[in-house]
Image: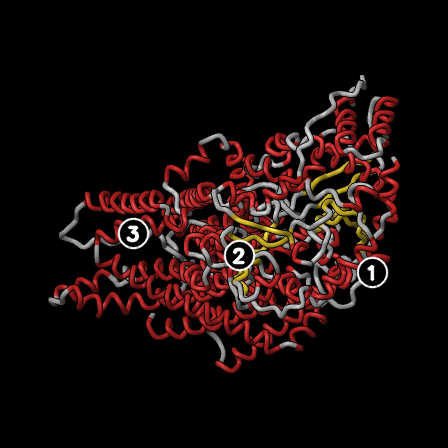
């Protein structure tokens, strides 16, 4: 799960041109700015593409104060969300690591939190928590999974030898956690925070759409609604810059921690963790039992909560009514699920193809890498979901836009993982193959590709989950069929049971996709790692 | 969530603005020498300018302010939830709050903005986060009450809902018949009203629904022939950008409804009757102040109530008269501003919702309470 966006590209020896590593990114950024400026001048997308200068003007012009206050509000919400979400995630990972019986259940809950689409959750959060705390809560949820996974990986990253020594010396599990596992996990935790920070920005902005008094999300909305392209771009630019800044700071912190606490290992440990132990049948039974207990627990909590807190059925309906709605119109749910899956599937294929192709091109063509990678790093740190409205405006109000939006979400993890995978082949193996006279192409197919496959698959697993969420978000914005549409239609008409039914279907679908891609990943890792 | 698509319209604006006779600030200060001068004179000005028969509000205000030189004892606080972001749509509240018109009757207020994605106002009240709501029209309350709430309509800010259609000026549309076969853009959920427009005109719904987000661009791009919108908003926004449009509220197509319906739960009303009467008295004074000087609210909006929302002054200045034009009807001329007519409600409004496919509709007898506003008018 470690996404190494900033992994250094190994330079091929012999043609080491330090100039190129400076010139190429400059050229790349220059090309992008030029295209942007041309597009802005030509008024692409019915004038929705504005020049860089126009996009910056609102930020430095007379409404400077408005943007400053909005940025402060959003960053503050994102920051609190980051702290709260990471703290909960850290504790959850620690509990999962020290209390083995709870491990599976906590991991499944984390997957649900990750899969819970904000569109379906945010309105309830806002009603329940109030509009000031809503963005913080959405940000916390957005952060949770990244930090949970990276902390889990970090806790498992201490060398087995260290465990063995302490165990032989008679120390308890608690001592082992404190003295061996915790120190080793800090770089990994920071890794999670690094990915979580842009997610927290996106979450806070998304939360603000649901009625916060101020913030970048509020500005994005008002700009969109009044068709003020330059304001839309300005708010988007600030969001991207904040995400990037947080990402950069945390990457620097991680770089500072690594020499002291050791580097982060890849994710195969967590994979091994789930793969080990018991027959396949037994594992399946345990898995099903865990899921059943979780589902029963969540429904019971839901039921008890609406009774105990006297929640209006207009805010949260009873589980029984939701169930009746689902049972009564199964075919509608099936149809909507089918079209959401089709959108997500198409987006997945498109995004994965482009992502892998771009990563391969970046590894083979130096200028391409230099030009494109900085741009992709910027975009990877940008809260993309928050920019959907801008993209919808640029790409048009078409069903294909939903697929493009979702494909964009797929592209980044696939690109990033493929890119780090392509550098994963051991250097000595490469030297051997080269010494035996293999061509660059031969080396690529013999060595680089096989070493990269597990990484690509890991990227695809993450992307698969994202593709469902992105499809749903796109559908709620401009879709005409699918679960996202069903949710927003019913919710707007205050038909709460079908709205919640759609929300639950969304969660189930994305958890199922995540789980299915997880087992594919395990199978591939077992074969290729 | 109920107001997503509101801002898509502009074309109707010329007509609306023509109707909105700009009533300048006719009267200067009215001689009160205490620190309530500003609010008192505002109320008086409003009354005069609006040409209504009653001057009681101003008189009462003057008396109260003059005798105590400060607000009357507070009866409590009314947390008011709007269904949209800070906008000239709430001009009456802003003026009443800023000029102390609420407090002089004993009502404290907290004004809470909504937004395109906020939970429905009915839900916010149900969650306990607000006491008094402004719903874009009646349908939300009818649906909420089916889910177990006990909302009652106490008045309406606008006599005609500004919600309707907007289309490009060169598209020939004038009656519901012209909608047949069109690509109609709207936010998910608008289908109910689009269908109803067809049905109240004895037409079979025949159109392609184009799902839209918040902005009217699909109309400009030709992805939609016509879009749902607030005639007080998107048409004006588009016109300011040089796009010529026409627009008309759904009521012009035969689907009648009030706009920005004022409501609270029966439980809250029963427990806070005096407070609500005071609140309505302040709000009435705010409406009159806005009628008297439609420009007064603009600086309040940009510098105070909407300072975090990047208020578009050009739109706000053009939009406020369009809203003000919706304050009056024949019924309000006889019964006072903000009034809802129970008879019209039963004869015209509810049948429209029946046409929209709503069943188990209530009647005005259970859904509308005119007594609080009536008491407020006497203050």
Determine the CA span between mark 2 and mark 3: 49 Å
Marks 2, 1: nearer the viewer: 2
Marks 2, 3: nearer the viewer: 2
In screen coordinates, is B49 left or right of A61? Answer: right
Q: Nearer the viewer, residue B133 or A421?
A: B133
Q: Chain of mark 1?
A: B
Residues tagged 2 and 1 counted as in contact (Cβ below 8 A):
no
In screen coordinates, is A19 left or right of A86? Answer: left
Residues tagged 2 and 3 counted as in contact (Cβ below 8 A):
no
Determine the CA span between mark 2 and mark 1: 37 Å
Residue hosting label 3: A372
- Above or below residue A522? Residue B10 is above
The first of marks 2 and 1 along the sequence is 2
**Is residue B301 visible in the rendered structure shown here?**
yes
- Label ID, residue B172: 2
- Above or below residue A457? Residue B276 is above
Marks 1, 3: nearer the viewer: 1
Q: How many marks?
A: 3
Q: Chain of mark 3?
A: A
- Label ID, residue B363: 1
Point 87% across, 43% down: residue: B374
Point 53% across, 49% down: residue: B245
Share a chain, discs 1 and 3? no
Q: Of helix, strand and loop, which one carries label 2?
A: loop
Share a chain, discs 2 and 3? no
Q: Of helix, strand and loop, which one carries label 1?
A: loop
- Above or below residue A91? Residue B303 is above
Determine the CA span between mark 1 and mark 3: 64 Å
In screen coordinates, is A8 left or right of A108? Answer: left
Quarter of the figure that contains the C terminus of chain A: bottom left
């Amino acid at each position: 799960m470690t996404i190494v966006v900033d992994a250094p590209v190994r330079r091929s020896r012999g043609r080491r041109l330090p100039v190129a590593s400076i010139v190429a990114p400059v050229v790349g950024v220059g090309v992008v700015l030029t295209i942007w400026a041309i597009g802005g001048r030509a008024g692409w997308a019915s004038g929705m593409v504005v020049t860089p200068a126009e996009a910056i003007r609102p930020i430095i012009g007379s409404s400077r104060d408005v943007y400053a206050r909005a940025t402060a509000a959003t960053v503050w919400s994102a920051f609190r969300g980051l702290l709260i979400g990471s703290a909960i995630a850290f504790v959850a990972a620690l509990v999962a690591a020290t209390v083995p019986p709870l491990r599976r259940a906590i991991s499944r809950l984390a997957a649900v939190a990750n899969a819970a689409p904000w569109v379906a959750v945010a309105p309830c959060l806002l009603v329940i928590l109030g509009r000031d705390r809503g963005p913080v809560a959405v940000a916390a949820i957005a952060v949770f999974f990244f930090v949970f996974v990276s902390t889990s990986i970090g806790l498992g990253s201490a060398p087995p030898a260290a465990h063995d020594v302490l165990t032989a010396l008679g120390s308890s599990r608690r001592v082992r956690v404190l003295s061996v596992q915790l120190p080793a996990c800090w770089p990994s935790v920071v890794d999670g925070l690094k990915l979580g920070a842009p997610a927290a920005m996106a979450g806070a902005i998304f939360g603000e759409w649901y009625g916060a008094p101020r913030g970048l999300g509020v500005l994005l909305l008002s700009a969109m609604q009044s068709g003020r392209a330059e304001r839309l771009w300005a708010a988007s630019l600030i969001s991207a810059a904040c995400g990037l800044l947080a990402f950069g700071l945390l990457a620097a912190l991680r770089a500072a921690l690594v020499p002291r606490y050791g580097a982060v290992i890849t994710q195969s440990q967590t994979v091994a963790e789930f793969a080990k132990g018991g027959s396949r049948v037994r594992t399946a039974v345990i898995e099903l039992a865990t899921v059943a207990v979780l589902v029963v627990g969540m429904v019971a909590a839901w039921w008890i909560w609406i009774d105990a807190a006297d929640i209006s059925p207009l805010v949260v309906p009873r589980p029984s009514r939701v169930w009746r709605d689902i049972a009564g119109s199964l075919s509608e749910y099936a149809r909507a699920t089918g079209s959401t899956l089709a959108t997500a599937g198409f987006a997945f294929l498109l995004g994965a193809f482009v992502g892998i192709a771009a990563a391969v091109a970046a590894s083979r063509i130096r200028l391409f890498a230099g030009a494109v990678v900085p741009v992709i790093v910027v975009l990877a740190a940008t809260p993309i979901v928050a920019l959907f409205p801008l993209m919808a405006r640029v790409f048009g109000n078409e069903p294909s836009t939903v697929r493009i939006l979702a494909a964009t979400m797929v592209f980044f993890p696939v690109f990033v993982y493929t890119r780090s995978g392509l550098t994963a082949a051991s250097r000595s193996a490469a030297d051997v193959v080269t010494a035996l006279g293999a061509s660059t192409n031969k080396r690529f197919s013999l060595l680089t590709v096989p070493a990269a496959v597990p990484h690509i698959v890991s990227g695809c697993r993450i992307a698969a989950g994202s593709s469902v969420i992105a499809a749903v978000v796109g559908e709620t914005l401009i879709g005409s069929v699918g679960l996202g549409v069903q949710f927003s239609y019913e919710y707007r008409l205050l038909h709460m049971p079908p709205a919640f039914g759609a929300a639950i279907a969304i969660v189930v679908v994305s958890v199922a996709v995540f789980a299915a891609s997880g087992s594919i990943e395990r199978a591939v890792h077992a074969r290729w790692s | 969530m109920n107001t997503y698509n509101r801002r898509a319209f502009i074309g109707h604006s010329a007509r609306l603005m023509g109707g909105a006779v700009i009533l300048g600030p006719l009267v200067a200060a009215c001689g009160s020498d205490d620190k309530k001068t500003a609010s008192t004179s505002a109320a008086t000005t409003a009354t005069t300018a609006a040409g209504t028969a009653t001057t009681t509000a101003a008189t009462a205000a003057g008396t109260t302010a003059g005798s105590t030189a400060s607000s009357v004892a507070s009866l409590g606080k009314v947390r008011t939830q709007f269904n949209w972001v800070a906008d000239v749509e709430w001009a009456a509240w802003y003026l009443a709050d800023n000029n102390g018109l609420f407090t002089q009757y004993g009502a404290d207020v907290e004004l809470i903005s909504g937004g395109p994605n906020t939970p429905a106002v009915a839900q916010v009240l149900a969650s306990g986060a607000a006491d008094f709501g402004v719903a874009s029209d009646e349908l939300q309350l009818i649906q909420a009450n089916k889910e177990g709430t006990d909302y009652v309509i106490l008045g309406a800010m606008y006599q005609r809902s500004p919600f309707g259609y907007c289309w490009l000026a060169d598209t020939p549309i004038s009656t519901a018949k012209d909608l047949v076969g069109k690509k109609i853009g709207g936010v998910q959920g608008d289908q109910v009203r689009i269908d109803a427009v067809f049905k109240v005109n004895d037409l079979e719904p025949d159109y392609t629904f184009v799902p839209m987000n918040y902005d009217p661009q699909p109309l400009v791009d030709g992805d939609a022939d016509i879009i749902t919108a607030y005639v007080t908003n998107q048409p004006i926004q588009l016109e300011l950008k040089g796009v010529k449009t026409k627009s008309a509220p759904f009521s012009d197509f035969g689907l009648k409804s009030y706009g920005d319906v004022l409501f609270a739960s029966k439980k809250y009303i029963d427990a806070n009757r005096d407070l609500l009467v005071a609140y309505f008295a302040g709000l009435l004074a705010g409406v009159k102040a806005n009628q008297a000087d439609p420009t007064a609210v603009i600086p309040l909006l940009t510098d105070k109530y909407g300072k975090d929302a990047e208020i578009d002054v050009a739109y706000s200045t053009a939009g406020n008269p369009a809203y003000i034009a919706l304050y009056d009807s024949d019924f309000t001329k006889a019964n006072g501003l903000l009034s809802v007519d129970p008879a019209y409600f039963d004869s015209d409004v509810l049948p429209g919702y029946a046409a929209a496919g709503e069943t188990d509709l209530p009647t005005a007898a259970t859904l509308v309470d005119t007594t609080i506003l009536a008491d407020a008018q006497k203050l």
